[in-house]
Amino acid sequence: MTLVTKAIITALEQEADIIIKTYKLKETKTLWSLKIYEWVRNNDDNEQENIVLVVCGEWKIHAAFASTYLCENYNLQKVINIWIVWNLHHDSLKIWDVILPNTFVQHDFYMPKELDFSKHLREPIFLEYAIGEEYDLEKFNLHLSWICATGDQFIDNIDLQSEIRETFWADIVDMESYAILSVIKQYDMLDKMVVIKSVSDGADNTSKDSTMNNLELAMQNAFAILDFTL
C-alpha cells in the first residue's frame, strides 16, 4: 500500500518553526531553494501517513518549484499552503486574523488582452473548502471566502495597496498562492488544496517592521487551523 502524504508549503524558516517543533519534523533533504522535512505518523484511523513540510523561500518561482516537486514525488492526499499576508481591508481585518481565501489572482501580471495564449494567467483560481466547523476562535477571527492577490512585490506602499484593492477587489496580498495553485491545477488536484493565511501587517509604510514583529503570533493562529485541518 502506497503511503499517502499530507504536504505543507511555507516560505520562511521563521514561519515553519512552529510546525517543525510541534510535529517534531526532521530535515530529510535540501534541493536548490527547498528544505524538506518529513515525519510518518498514525492518523485517527490508525493508518500511517507521511507529513512533509517544504520551506521554499519567497517569490512565485520558488513556490511553483515546491509545488511541482511535491506533485512529482508524493502520493498527495492534501496540500496545505500556510503563510503570513498583507491586509488590504483595515476596517474588516486586523493583525493576527486568519483567512481561508477561496479566490486567487495575480496582481503583477501584465500582458495585452489580445494575446489569447496568456488568458489563463489572468483568470482567477477558485477553491472550495470542506475542513469542518469546530474552530477555536477565542484568540482571533477566522474569515472564509476572501480574495487573495499574489505578486512578486513586498507591499509597503499605500498607493499600491489601494490599486490592488480597487483593481482586483482583493482583501489580502501574498507572494506565493497563485503560483502554487497554478501548478496544483495542472495536476488536477485543486480539490486537495487548502490555503491558510494569517495577517501580519497592513501593507503600508510600517510593513517592514510589523511583518517580523507580528510573524510569531500570526503563525500561531494560522497553526491552530493547520493542526485542525491536518
Image (cartoon, rainbow, N blue to C red):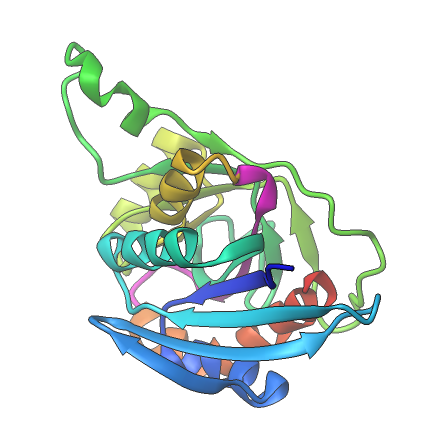
Q: For the view shown, which residue lies furthest in the top direction?
A: 114
- At which x and y percent is residue 186? 39, 35
Horizontally, residue 127 falls left or right of residue 70, namely: right
Indicate left or right for 81 with 191 as reference: left
Position of the N terminus by quadrant = bottom right
Q: Is residue 194 magenta?
A: yes
Q: Is residue 110 above or below residue 43?
A: above
Q: Is residue 9 above or below residue 148?
A: below
Residue 31: give x, y in percent of width and height.
25, 72
- Please tell me which residue is depicted at 39% across the width and 32% down the height of the picture: 168
State which region is magenta. Answer: 190-206
Q: Which of 32/197 is in front?
A: 32
* 57 with respect to 170 (left or right): left
Q: How far across and down, in percent of the image, does residue 105 sit?
A: 38, 36
Residue 153 in sight in this render: no
x 57%, y 62%: residue: 5
Residue 117 figure quarter: top left
- Toward the viewer: 170 or 160? 170
**Residue at horizontal 34 percent and vertical 79 percent from the top:** 29
Determine the residue positioned at 70% across, 61% down.
229
